Image (cartoon, grey):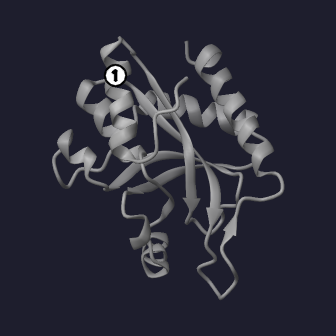
């Protein structure tokens, strides 16, 4: 387990280092903003496909291709977290962006119509690197915040139980990596 830095360039720098050290499988755990209508803060999103709106992944994958996890690892993660996590676990399309101030409400509404569940800053680049090196990888994201896209309610960041939910999700990631997929 490592903390790879914030944003795609820093995270990829760390990933390149651990790949050079011989890492054979990657389970990415991070946070995402919730876009999907049914998501709540504390839910998990397992990325089935990640739209690339950051720049680092373009050094590893051609334009026009979304980043994707290893399908076998994806199915194992889905089964494990749906059976063990107390809150909801969703699988679907997410998006990564490095332009945090360009994430507008109008964009989020469009993404929701396109069935995007969440947004983060690193997943598309990390999965692109793993694809490039043919290393199985999967992304598991905990929803840390959610904009209300339907009316004028305030942005919902965290919750009273978020720190506890995050700890439980991290503990489950450790169990998943150390016991379930070996």
Toward the left, the furthest residue is 62
Q: Is residue 65 above or below residue 117?
A: above
Judging depth in this view, the residue of 107 and 136 nearest the camera is: 107
Which quarter of the rendering shows the C terminus?
top right
Q: How dense is the environment of label 1, judged by Cα within 10 Å: few (below 14), some, or many (20 and up)? A: few
Quadrant in the picture for the N terminus: top right
Residue name at image x 64 percent, y 55 percent: 144
Q: Is there any visible trace of residue 68 in the rendered image?
A: no
Going 83% across and 57% down the picture, which residue do you hit? 160
Position of residue 142 measured from the top left corner of the image (x, y, whole percent)? 62, 48
In the rendered structure, the answer to whether residue 141 lies left or right of residue 98 reads right
Residue 14 drawn at (x, y percent): 38, 29
Q: Secondary structure at mark 1?
A: helix
Residue at x 72%, y 59% (from the top left corner): 158
Q: Looking at the rendering, which quadrant does residue 19 occupy?
A: top left
- Vertical relation: 158 (above or below) 147: above
Residue 90 in the figure: left or right of residue 138: right
Residue 118 in percent (x, y) is at: 52, 58
Residue at (42%, 30%) from the top-left corner? 137
- Residue farthest toward the right in the current orientation of the protein: 160
Name the residue carrying label 1: 17
């Amino acid at each position: 387990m490592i903390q790879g830095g914030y944003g795609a360039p820093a995270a990829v720098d760390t990933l390149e280092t651990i790949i050079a050290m011989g890492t054979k499988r990657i389970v990415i755990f991070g946070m995402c903003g919730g876009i999907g209508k049914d998501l709540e803060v504390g839910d998990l999103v397992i990325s089935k496909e990640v739209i690339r709106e950051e720049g680092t992944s373009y050094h590893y994958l051609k334009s026009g291709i979304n980043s994707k996890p290893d399908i076998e690892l994806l199915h194992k993660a889905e089964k494990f977290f749906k059976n063990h996590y107390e809150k909801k676990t969703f699988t679907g399309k997410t998006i990564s962006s490095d332009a945090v101030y360009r994430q507008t409400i109008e964009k989020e509404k469009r993404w929701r119509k396109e069935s995007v569940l969440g947004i983060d800053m690193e997943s598309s680049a990390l999965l692109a690197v793993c694809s490039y090196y043919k290393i199985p990888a999967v992304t598991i994201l905990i929803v840390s915040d959610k904009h209300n896209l339907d009316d004028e309610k305030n942005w919902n960041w965290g919750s009273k139980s978020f720190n506890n939910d995050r700890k439980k999700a991290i503990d489950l990631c450790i169990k998943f990596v150390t016991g379930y997929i070996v």
